[in-house]
Image (spheres, grey):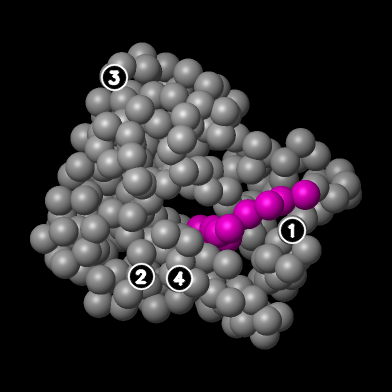
């Protein structure tokens, strides 16, 4: 099982999360590409740290929404979205290569992530951008995402979220709803182990939802994220799960 986290989400003088500490825990780093967070210097520092530690680098692409941290629903024409995703991907990959690494996968962020799960047109726009840049790059998304239906041969990898609440349909509970983000360490750890060993999660209504996932996400911008990620990794190893990058 892979463990991924969102990194590089500061901007200029504003720091969000402990990128260096999380790079010691995760196996894959979803690096902000400047549209929802991040700037060239932060991108370079995170890529250098990932290369130094052998962490796989992923491009976390977003709607152009720096003020809203990429979490606001936006209407972007498919052609424009493809170009903007391509722009972000190429920028991060160029920086990663300058540091001796490369982008090995793509993961949408925030509102774009949730949109491509249900919207085939927006999903295809992201797929088109990835294919135009490198058809060998996998896309990371939820099981059952619309991306799977429009991938046309592009590799799609499913992920799950240890610290997010799920609906009975297997979607993430909106952050506008109470309890959408789970902060209790024990609960998050138990969910991560269940996801990795049983392939399921308990939804908000108490039902069991099947999850066939290859990667577990632990958010890097929540309080205590580093300790939480360490606890998740330790629990997975203790449960006999091999922790390794998916890409």
- Residue that mark 2 sits on: 55
Badge 2: residue crowd in 10 Å (few <14, some 14–19, many ≥20): many
- Residue that mark 4 sits on: 26
Badge 4: residue crowd in 10 Å (few <14, some 14–19, many ≥20): many
Q: Residue at x 21, y 35 (%)?
A: 87
Residue 100 shown in magenta: no
Q: Which residue is drawn at 39% across and 30% down?
A: 126
Q: Quick check: can you spot residue 179?
A: no
Q: How far apart are marks 3 and 4 (CA)?
A: 32 Å
Which region of the structure is painted magenta?
Answer: 210-220
Q: Residue 199 carries which label?
A: 1
Identify the mark nearer the N-term, 2 or 4.
4
Q: Distance between the residues labelled 2 and 3?
A: 31 Å
Q: Which mark is residue 80?
A: 3
Identify the mark nearer the N-term, 2 or 3.
2
Identify the mark nearer the N-term, 3 or 4.
4
Q: Quick check: can you spot residue 226?
A: yes
């Amino acid at each position: 099982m892979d463990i991924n986290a969102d990194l590089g989400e500061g901007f200029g003088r504003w720091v969000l999360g402990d990128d260096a500490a999380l790079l010691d825990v995760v196996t894959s780093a979803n690096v902000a590409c400047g549209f929802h967070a991040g700037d060239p210097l932060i991108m370079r520092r995170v890529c250098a740290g990932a290369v130094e530690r052998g962490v796989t680098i992923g491009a976390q692409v977003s709607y152009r929404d720096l003020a809203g941290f990429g979490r606001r629903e936006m209407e972007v024409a498919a052609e424009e979205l493809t170009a903007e995703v391509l722009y972000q991907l190429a920028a991060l990959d160029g920086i990663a290569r300058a540091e001796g690494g490369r982008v090995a996968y793509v993961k949408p962020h925030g509102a774009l992530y949730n949109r491509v799960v249900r919207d085939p047109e927006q999903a295809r726009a992201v797929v088109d951008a990835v294919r135009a840049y490198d058809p060998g790059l996998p896309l990371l998304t939820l099981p059952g995402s619309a991306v799977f239906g429009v991938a046309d041969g592009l590799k799609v990898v499913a992920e799950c979220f240890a610290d997010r609440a799920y609906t009975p349909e297997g979607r993430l509970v909106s952050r506008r709803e109470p309890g959408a983000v789970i902060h209790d360490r024990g609960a998050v750890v138990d969910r991560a182990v269940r996801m990795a060993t049983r392939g399921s999660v308990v939804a908000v209504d108490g039902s069991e939802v099947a999850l066939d996932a290859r990667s577990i996400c632990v958010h890097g911008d929540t309080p205590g994220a580093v300790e939480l990620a360490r606890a998740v990794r330790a629990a997975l190893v203790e449960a006999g799960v091999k922790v390794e990058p998916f890409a």
